Image (cartoon, rainbow, N blue to C red):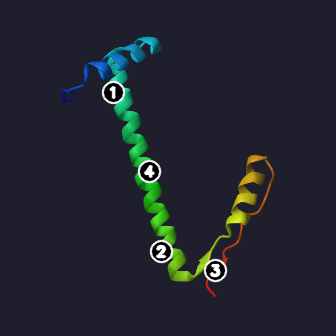
Amino acid sequence: MTTTSLKLSDELKQRAASAAQELGMSLHAFMVSAIEQAALAAEQRIRLIAEARSAREAMLETGQGLDADAVHAYLHAKVAGKKVARPKKRAWRT
């Protein structure tokens, strides 16, 4: 494990210390957790963007895609616990 130092403004350090205390954590544990959460969020965003780019390329290549209204209806039904078939791809180019 390596040591890293951070330069924080007095205000930010105090906010972090107060939050850590409220959560029953040490300041160190709070900062490690915050960095871990930020790294995870960034990794998830990077994966989401890569998947979106790949889906866009597939749509441009095939001319097939999903109708937004059909996707919304599908998601609403799934959230409501209903069994529902996935929407079918359709041609979007004319």
Q: CA gap, disc 3 to disc 2?
A: 14 Å
The reply to whether dot 3 and dot 2 touch (C-beta < 8 Å) is no
Image coordinates of residue 71 in percent, x first then y, are 69, 62
Of badges 3 and 2, nearer the viewer stands 3
**Which residue occupies 51% across, 75% down?**
58
Q: Earlier in the sequence, mark 3 or mark 2?
A: 2
Task: Judge by depth and name the residue closer to the eye, 81 or 91.
Answer: 91
Assign a secondary structure to mark 1.
Answer: helix
Name the residue that disc number 1 marks. Answer: 32
Within-10-Å neighbours for mark 2: few <14, some 14–19, many 20+: few
The answer to whether residue 58 is above or below residue 42 is below
Q: Is residue 85 left or right of residue 35?
A: right
Image coordinates of residue 92 in percent, x first then y, are 63, 80
Residue type, numbered disc 1? Val
Residue type, numbered disc 2? Glu
Image coordinates of residue 40 in percent, x first then y, are 41, 41
Q: Earlier in the sequence, mark 2 or mark 4?
A: 4
Name the residue that disc number 3 marks. Answer: 92
Within-10-Å neighbours for mark 1: few <14, some 14–19, many 20+: few
Q: Which mark is residue 57?
A: 2
Q: CA gap, disc 2 to disc 4?
A: 18 Å
